Image (tube, helix red, strand yellow):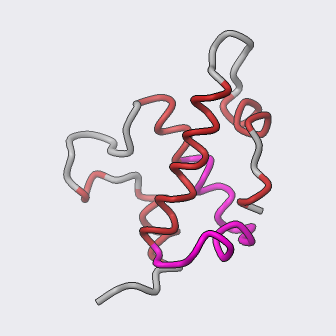
Amino acid sequence: MVGEITVADVVDYLRLSDGEYSETELQAMIAAARRYICDYTGHDEAWVDAREDLWAVVMVIVQDMHDNRGLYVTGTQEKNVNRMIWSALNMHSVNLL
């Protein structure tokens, strides 16, 4: 579940070695990824934290933040957001107009 993701989980997922990461940075990235999902989908943190199917989305967002220090694949236009993130979050969005 998203709410149970730890820094150790992220370190394993990203295959980082000691000295290649800051625990504080990774904690901030996990929190930012969770908040991004909440804002994108319109769901609250309790709902997001209880989801197992969004675990991979958090990991991909954190990986992208870690690797690129940004969410966008290239440029800054929304169309360049990682497609896996876009697709998975659109399935859960309740705040569409």
Which of the two residues, 97 or 23, is positioned nearer the viewer here?
23
**For residue 29, side relative to residue 41 (left or right):** right
Image x and y of residue 94, in percent? 46, 86
Which residue occupies 69% across, 21% down? 16
Query: Would you place residue 72 above or below residue 95 in this image?
Result: above
Q: Which residues are magenta?
A: 41-60
User: Which quadrant of the view contains residue 12?
Assistant: top right
Q: How many marks?
A: 0
**As drawn, is 4 to the left or to the right of 71?**
right
10 to 18, vertically: above or below: below
Query: Within the magenta stretch, is there residue 58?
Result: yes
Q: Quadrant of the C terminus?
A: bottom left
Question: As displayed, is residue 35 above or below residue 22?
Answer: below
Q: Where's the N terminus, which quadrant?
A: bottom right
79 inside magenta stretch: no
The residue shown at (37%, 38%) is 70
Relative height, residue 28 to residue 32 (above, below): above
- Residue drawn at x 42%, y 64% as measured from the top left: 86
**Picture coordinates of residue 4 (x, y %)?**
79, 55
Q: Residue furthest top?
A: 19
Estimate the x, y position of residue 55 in percent, counting from the top left.
69, 58
